[in-house]
Amino acid sequence: MAGNLKRDEARERARILSVDSYTVELDLTTGEETFRSTTVVRFSSTEPGARTFIELAAPRVLSATLNGRELDPAELFDGERLALPGVAAENELTVVADAAYMRTGEGLHRFVDPVDDAVYLYSQFETADAHRMYACFDQPDLKATFELTVFTPPEWEVISNSAPDAAREETGTEGRVRWHFPPTEPMSTYITGLIAGAYHVVRDEHDGIDLGLYCRASLAEHLDSEELFDVTKRGFDFYHQLFGVRYAFGKYDQLFVPEFNAGAMENAGAVTFLEDYVFRSRVTDARYERRAETLLHEMAHMWFGNLVTMRWWDDLWLNESFATYASVYAQVNATRWTEAWTTFANVEKAWALRQDQLPSTHPIAADMTDIQTVEVNFDGITYAKGASVLKQLAAYVGVDSFFAGVRAYFREFAFGNTELKDLFKHLEEASGRDLSGWSREWLETSGVNTMRPDFEVADDGTFSSFAVLQEADPEYPTLRSHRLAVGLYDRTDEGIVRRERVELDVSGARTEVPELVGLERPDLVLVNDDDLTFTKIRLDERSLATVVESAGRIRRSLPRALVFGAAWDMTRDGEMAARDYVRLVISGIDGVDDVMVAQTLLRQAHGALVNYADRDWRPVGQKQLADRLQQLVNEAEPGSDLQLAYVNALAATAVSETHLSLLRGLLDGALAVEGLTVDTDLRWTLLRRLVTSGKAGEDEIAAELQKDPTATGARHAAGARAAIPTPEAKAAAWERIVGSELANAEFRATLLGFTEPDQGELLRPYVEKYFAQLQPAWESWTGEFAQSFAEMMYPSALVEESTVERTDAYLEKEDPAPALRRLLVEGRAGVVRALRARAADTAAGLDRA
């Protein structure tokens, strides 16, 4: 994996260098493979005569001049770094290079739309890929201003961090115009950006901020600009009030770009988003909610990350956790998604719990020794556990004090770089609390605690004692201080409702709750009611029975999500049989009116069947779940979000001829369900299940692609072809994967199709090929491709001891790089967990036989 800057190197470079400005000129008219990149960087050094380096990843360096002295690229450039011998106190470096367009979603990515052959470019520089576009000191604490000139074809739009002062200025050369962007505020290299091409644009203005929305021309009809601008304007109004500092980067453009690797990227004033957020087919409101969270997450970065930036990636978690916490806080308080904390519990927190129980778990404040380590730490701890803990911190110091401290932090460190201690100083001053102990407990330790109710019941049915027990994994034995609530819920004619709530501080292994003594035992005891802290929870026997029988009758969405989450966590831990979890979902799903929760439950039920159920019982459970889904499709309100959610879930679960015939009928138009529109994306969903079940193949895929000859259609087709359940299809897909000719979107789609979990036996011949390809991929592919291959192609579908043993043998013999080792250890842990859960489900089946 190329370009691995180490923290010690970055610290040393920051010790001796200060960067003033970059003046960058790009000529994007020189060809389809490369572009001309000219960089002038002005910087100073506290140690004249020192030797340092600047990053640049480019096929050719044409010239390099330091303070008027020509440098020899043949001697000083190694393909990724240009050595700078003998820097002066004040320096001017000019580098002219032919840089390469990328197809991996890193650097300056180039895409040609198959619909109209229009060209689209966008940059993606986090964590350290700005030097794929221009020569730079590519680390976050060497901030500078950026002035950009770009030459493009005349029909293109060009977008960067600042607004252009010369748009489409004629150059006198046919087919070539000049754009000029004046110097920005000081910023880090990773949030600089360039987006160019035949983009469709819609413009607006709000509170003195020019707003822009961009997408490919072929998607323009689907761009719901009114909805997107509404969320954007609400976000700015809310954050201006909450943060006390105005948005600092002038205009604000949001760009939906093709073949994007992540959800979004917070380039200052020019945020890029996965273009799947431009919905070309009908989606449920859950997708709109998640899109709004992403929009607000990236907007929060304009303050936390862009205005004030971490000194090094050790504090990556604070950037991402703060943006996640702030985005959900904004959703609840400024948009229609007032129950967003329920979604947070279902999505972000569930992700954090999974990540924190892997052998690769790490403290929230992680030790980021190099860029490879950083890149595998964009994980559930960095984003979701950190956000959960910030929510706990806000409760601990008081929400008002928390944001008062944040406002003071922004004012003091605007356009600078900081460390965690700088934020905590202001939080302590605002709240009067010493956070050193809190930080040690929550940020510097790994692992998650488990909370259980422990009580005795008197003859009259009341609690004679009640306590909350706290446990920790023996490998991570920290017992933390928690602020949480205990709720008592009863069955009533109106559903399961809360009768009593007690909020308390929990610390140590046992905390008594005298306020509950003497109260009648309820049908459901819920520890961590209202989801105040980051913890796993367990249900007592009666509470678990209540949940399994009638969880859908819990009236409020958040406690309903919490008990479903507890049951799912118990299933993953082998404390609840997978068949019981499936039964819980089947019995309770009709009482769930929150489509986000419903989709999560159905996805987890399918996951329980695939990963955790006894292999002999799995077909039984799949048929039970699919039968229930088919019933729900027919009973759902026509045209409702839930109806669409049930159809999508059925398409993932269908196994019998009856189920598959329904999918075929919907696809062919022979059958209709009132209110259901079988549009483009749903057609691909239906076809994918028919393909994986052997009921459709290449002919049907080709016919569907002819109906949808778009980039999205090509991606769906690539995944479907890789999922055809034949040895020939798997062999062809493997050759496409290792051939390194696919662009990133089709590459990932092919990986997902190849590794269909129901096709384990077809994947068995590729176990050895996978382990043989790991090291070559890690050494020669880009970071994004290498990580995707290592993680997604791991043979997790083969849930057996031989997979664990083969992984152990590879780790012992090859001693892979730490980042690669981590990905393999995580894959191994998933198989071990599945083996344990399957054993529990098998035992439950034997007990009931």
Image: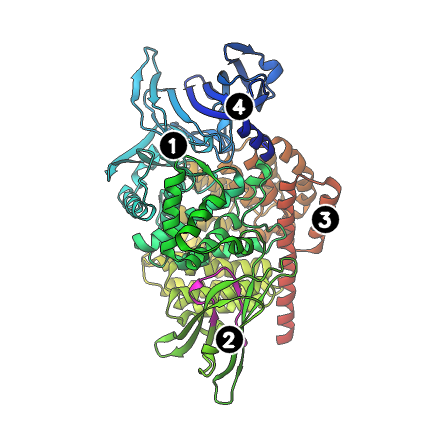
Q: In the image, what residue type sits under mark 3?
A: Asp
Looking at the figure, which quarter contains the C terminus? bottom right
CA distance separating discs 4 and 3 = 49 Å
Question: Which label belongs to residue 46?
Answer: 4
Q: Earlier in the sequence, mark 3 or mark 1?
A: 1
Residue at the disc numbered 2 = 545
Residue at the disc numbered 1 = 115
- Quadrant location of residue 377? top right
CA distance separating discs 1 and 2 = 55 Å
Q: Secondary structure at mark 4?
A: loop
CA distance separating discs 4 and 2 = 69 Å
Place of residue 794 in the rendered image (x, y in percent of width and height, measured from the top left): 62, 46
Q: Answer few, some or many: residues within 10 Å of disc 4's Cα (few below 14, many 20 plus, some between 14 and 19).
A: some
Marks 4 and 3: CB-CB under 8 Å?
A: no
Q: Is residue 80 left or right of residue 598?
A: right
CA distance separating discs 3 and 2 = 40 Å
Q: Answer few, some or many: residues within 10 Å of disc 2's Cα (few below 14, many 20 plus, some between 14 and 19).
A: some
